[in-house]
Amino acid sequence: MSVQISVLVQTPAHSPLAEPLTYQSELPLAAGTLVRVPLGQSETLGVVWELQLGAAADPPPVPHKTIKPITSVLEGVAPLSKAWRQMVAFSASYYQRSLGEVALSALPPQLKSLDATQMQRRLRRKPPAASASQDAQAAESSPSPWALPELTPAQAEVLQRMDHASEHPGPFLLFGATGSGKTEVYLRAVQKVLESDPQAQALVMVPEINLTPQLEARFAHRFAQLLGSRFLPDTLVSMHSGMTGPQRLKSWLAAHQGQARIVLGTRMAIFASMPHLQLIVVDEEHDPSYKQQEGARYSARDLAVFRGRLENAPVILGSATPSLESWHHSRAAAEGGRYLRLEMPDRVGGHSNFPLVRRVDMNHQPKGAVFSQPLLQAIQERVARGEQCMILLNRRGYAPVLQCSDCDWKSECTHCSAYRVFHKIDRTLRCHHCGFTERVPRHCPACGNPDIRPLGRGTEQLEEHLSELLHAVARPDGSPVRVARIDADTTQKKGTLESQLASVHAGDVDVLVGTQMIAKGHDFRGITLVAALNPDGALFSSDFRAPERLFSLLLQAAGRAGRSPDLSAQSEMWVQTHHPQHPLYAALKAHNYPEFARQQLAEREQSALPPFSYQALLRADARTQEVAQGFLSAARLAATQLPAAEHVSCFAAVPLTIQRVANVERAQMLLESTSRTALQHHLSQWHSLLHALKKDPAHKGVIRWAVDVDPLAI
């Protein structure tokens, strides 16, 4: 006799099929079992689900004539754990998405396309090597004994305080200066967990894909030495969007089956199925990359804290510039703090010589100057001494816009309310929002004037300009200066980023030009000078988080200089600004993050901004701005009728900063409350009203809508 089971399938964000569907199965199946089920005219992957997680509720009976049987069970793959399902259920509820969307998007894409037979064939494949890795074999055959690096007093104290988890289980906010050895703390914490339990697993997260390979190499080398023959091919795996489908499936299966003891990954790794998870590390926890900006807009950092509490696993949040939310949560327990703040103020090597911050007042420089004369001279002197320099400009391309000098035509994108960026290297105008690309016109499309010029500058132009300025400067060996650029344009091909970084580490690059890609996480030992050009835009942004992001970027960039103890005393950070007396730059000069955080939190408390309030955005996309704002205005009116309306402020609808992308108009509406519970209750009740509004003929022009909880960009 068949039984009825509830199955989650992946559905569109606002599909009426948001809840588990009922299917027939010949045998009872445990919650978390992966199955193939028919859906419409096709077949899809599903996850057996309970109606109320943790409760023994049976699905309501449905007439058997209307129930379809499941197609097959993916045997050999253990059911997803209760803790994993609880995290998915929480994510769907908190971030206002459907259960099926969150659960199925958390699984590797290739898993969704394999049927039961293909899955069995995939599971029968043998790993590429059944013995220890080459690193482990080399470690065992090494004639000299291998020893762990000696800990600094600060590192030892931090690890000792983490060991007393019974007194404070965490989360731990590891506030460590750049170069203070936070990675070594992560390695020791993972080592302790793995040695205490032969099945224990650890999750280590990084914000950017480009940081994963170098961290993976460091972890592989360390644990190949420590584990020896027990370090198998799947002991350490990575998870990030740069991997192929088969690679992601292989890593996921290794973690799910418990073979992978260490998982390194970006934000997607927070949903990795790890049945023996005992430690979570979130490196550079302040980074906005941990917030997913499409689909289920979750924060991997916040979910890491929730998952650690759910699975009783310590969580380490590490950063030299913590997010203001985490900093606020790590205040003294007597003041309401929930995190334990652990500090490492000095760099490894016993020195605290952080780069000297020099502020250049560009008001006293020639108009239009790209490099001030003192900065250019400093770069020339360091290159002549054989030292490396890094120039930071967070804008790629040659110039942000092309302009006609006669009729004032500008290279606007025909599909977006933005300008197309001029890329000189391939003579194209490229929109960085919709991807629309055209060849640079020979003359102005509006008036025919052949004199069209670049306006502003990007990293491509800086690279060219620096090569011209430094052409007469020679390196110590007499060879010419080598200038290189690292940004999203130069790292599109697979392997190019790794080769470019290797050139910098090897000393083959004298001046490195790039965007924020080069400003965080990299251990450039030869760089002694870092310069930030034109960072003032964020000082007066309408986004209240802009100063926090700017300070973090600049302090992280400064941390790339002087990482070698031999060069730390002469390292410098130059900031070219029109506002040298701004408090942000004063705090940067003193390398005083606590003072900057104090100022910012005081301003936010006065304005009742996060972390002293909680926010959500309702976004709407439509063919016209009027339709988008009309939908939001109707939603706002409907929200006033909800029971919790008096506890939630609902502001008027406004266009986004870039209001049109790919011919779609975008608008948003901000909701704010001093109570997280009240805001969540309001959003959950609002959902049915939003679905009804979308079906209303008056709003038929609305393409999509989405709720963004705890938004990072407003």
Image (cartoon, helix red, strand yellow):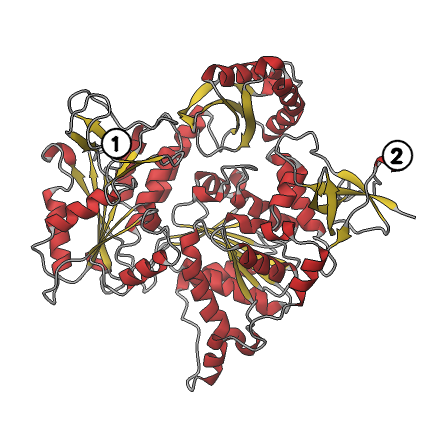
Relative placement, left or right, of 361 versus 300 is left
Labels 1 and 2 touching (C-beta < 8 A): no
Residue 698 or 176: which is nearer the viewer? Answer: 698
- Hey, what amino acid is under mark 1? Val
Residue 353 or 374: which is nearer the viewer? Answer: 374
Give the number of the disc on residue 401.
Answer: 1
Give the number of the disc on residue 477.
Answer: none
Can residue 637 be seen in the rendering of this structure?
no
Tell me: residue 219, above or below residue 649.
Answer: below
Task: Kindly indicate the quadrant of the structure image that contains residue 150.
Answer: bottom left
For the C terminus, the image quarter is top left
Give the number of the disc on residue 63.
Answer: 2
Can residue 15 be seen in the rendering of this structure?
yes
Tell me: residue 375, above or below residue 403.
Answer: below
- Mark 1 and mark 2: Cα distance apart in space: 63 Å
- Residue 710 x/y as whole percent: 52, 33
Q: Residue furthest right?
A: 1
- Residue 142 x/y as whole percent: 43, 84
Relative placement, left or right, of 537 versus 232 is left
Helix, strand or loop under label 1: strand
- Residue 107 x/y as whole percent: 62, 49
Residue visible at 18% across and 24% down in the picture: 448
Task: Kindly indicate the quadrant of the structure image that contains residue 395.
Answer: top left
Helix, strand or loop under label 2: loop
Q: Residue furthest bottom?
A: 143
Relative placement, left or right, of 236 versus 33 is left
Which mark sits nearer the N-terminus, 1 or 2? 2
